[in-house]
Image (spheres, rainbow, N blue to C red):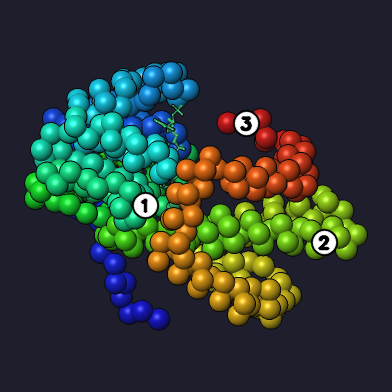
């Protein structure tokens, strides 16, 4: 067990909001992260303008939330900090549109390092380039902020021409609620590679495959779809909540001894050495750029493979079963 933690973690007291005084932040994009950053910064007293393309489907939502909206180029020209929160695959084109609007010493700010790390954006040399990456889906970044809670995040500096890049990034992290929970200092490389690995192997890829395989195993063995859904998907959240609150120990303490013995003796049979080797391969593909190249080419080709596997996922039986069962929850309409 580590005697002390290695990482440098910044909290609210370490971040000085005045670094964003007299500063306009342009938030490009109003999707998952964009709506959360824009609204949290605005509510934290920062001057925000949202940058959206002509005819954007997000415009009405941003305006309804009381924010000023302009085109990406207009927003970038008004701002000293430009936060690039459009999808990773469109960021290079959006950067090309706005790069001449930046003044020397302005900040180009990211929530994920993909395009800088894999050299899809070569930023101007006379600007700061920073990253504040919430370790959370954007909708929870907003929800946590509104509940006076925070979201853990990462901060990194790629280019510091002003000498204030980190301070400004920390002020931004504070503005969106990340230093309330703790913001870890990292690099663009480390953020990019760990984020891609985590979402592929565990958070988005590994866990959904585990759920689907387990669901199919039960249904093919003759158990009902409803049983399989509750057992393999719905209860997962409740188990993960315990791990989130108190680690593996709190979860093991809360489940029965029978579950604990069964889990400890069978879990490693399911996620075994083969799975571990696959994880190592997945990580290597992230590190050597294989995944990035594949994703960039997939986009250049119009995303044919992506659309196909996405549709297959949407049409998996567990989705229809889940939709019906969740509709029966008495609290389903609340919120
Ligand atoms: N999703 C998440 O929770 C997380 C995301 N990140 C990172 O944050 C960044 C943003 O991701 P995310 O929030 O998922 O993005 P979204 O897919 O939610 O972004 C959608 C927004 O981008 C706009 N947009 C889409 N295409 C274009 C375009 N071609 N030109 C201009 N605007 C466009 C959309 O506007 P329109 O209505 O006009 O289409 C919309 O406002 C990425 O770098 C991502 O890796 C980091 C942590 C978590
Ligand atoms: C886990 C997926 C994520 O990295 C995130 C929500 O943090 C993303 O890219 O959306
Ligand atoms: Mg992530
Ligand atoms: Mg990610």
Q: Mark 1 points at which residue?
A: 114
Q: Is mark 3 on a helix, strand or loop?
A: loop
As drawn, 218 above or below 177: below
Picture coordinates of residue 329, whole percent (x, y) = 73, 39
Distance (Cα) linking label 2 and label 3: 32 Å
Residue that extends furthest to the right in the rendered view of this protein: 222
Picture coordinates of residue 222, whole percent (x, y) = 90, 59
Picture coordinates of residue 252, whole percent (x, y) = 61, 71
Q: Which of the marked residues, 1 or 3, is nearer the chain's N terminus? A: 1
As drawn, 11 above or below 109: below
Q: Name the residue under label 3.
A: 334
Q: Residue, x 51% and y 71% (percent of image)?
A: 281
Q: Is mark 2 on a helix, strand or loop?
A: helix
Image depth: mark 2 or mark 1 in front: 1
The reply to whether the residue tagged 1 has its Cβ within 8 angstroms of ligand 1 is: yes
Distance (Cα) linking label 1 and label 3: 37 Å
Q: Residue, x 71% and y 72% (percent of image)?
A: 259
Q: Contact (CB < 8 A) between labels 1 and 3?
A: no
Q: Name the residue under label 2.
A: 218
Determine whether, in the image, residue 67 is placed left or right of residue 206: left
Along the viewing direction, whichever of 55 and 40 lies nearer the viewer: 55
Q: Is residue 140 visible?
A: no
Give the image quarter of residue 271.
bottom right
Give the quarter of the figure containing the N terminus: bottom left
As drawn, 22 above or below 181: above
Give the image quarter of residue 144.
top left
Q: Residue, x 88% and y 63% (percent of image)?
A: 221
Q: What element carries label 1?
A: helix
Give the quarter of the figure containing the C terminus: top right
* Badge 2 density bin: few <14, some 14–19, many ≥20, Cα 10 Å: some
């Amino acid at each position: 067990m580590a005697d002390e933690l290695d990482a440098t973690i910044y909290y609210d007291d370490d971040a000085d909001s005045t670094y964003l005084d007299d500063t306009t932040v342009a938030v490009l994009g109003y999707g998952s992260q964009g709506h959360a950053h824009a609204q949290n910064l605005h509510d934290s007293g920062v001057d925000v303008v949202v940058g959206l393309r002509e005819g954007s489907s997000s415009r009405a939502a941003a305006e309804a939330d009381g924010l000023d909206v302009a085109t990406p180029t207009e927003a970038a020209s008004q701002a000293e900090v430009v936060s690039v929160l459009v999808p990773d695959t469109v960021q290079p084109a959006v950067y090309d549109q706005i790069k001449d609007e930046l003044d020397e010493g302005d900040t180009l700010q990211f929530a994920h390092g993909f395009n800088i790390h894999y050299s899809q954006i070569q930023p101007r040399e006379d600007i700061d380039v920073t990253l504040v990456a919430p370790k959370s889906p954007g909708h929870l970044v907003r929800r946590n902020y509104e509940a006076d809670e925070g979201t853990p995040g990462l901060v990194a500096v790629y280019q510091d021409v002003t000498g204030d890049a980190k301070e400004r990034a920390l002020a931004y992290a504070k503005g969106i609620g990340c230093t309330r929970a703790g913001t870890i200092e990292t690099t663009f490389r480390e953020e990019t590679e760990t984020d891609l690995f985590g979402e592929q192997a565990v958070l988005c890829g590994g866990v959904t495959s585990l759920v689907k395989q387990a669901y199919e195993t039960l249904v093919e063995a003759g158990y009902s779809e409803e049983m399989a859904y509750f057992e393999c998907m719905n209860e997962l959240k409740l188990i993960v909540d315990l791990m989130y609150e108190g680690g593996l120990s709190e979860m093991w303490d809360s489940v029965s001894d029978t579950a604990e013995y069964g889990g400890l003796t069978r879990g490693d049979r399911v996620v075994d050495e083969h799975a571990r080797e696959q994880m190592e391969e997945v990580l290597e593909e992230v590190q050597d750029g294989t995944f990035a190249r594949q994703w960039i080419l997939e986009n250049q080709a119009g995303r044919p493979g992506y659309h196909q596997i996405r549709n297959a996922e949407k049409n998996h039986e567990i989705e229809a079963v889940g939709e019906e069962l969740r509709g029966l929850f008495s609290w389903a309409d609340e919120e």
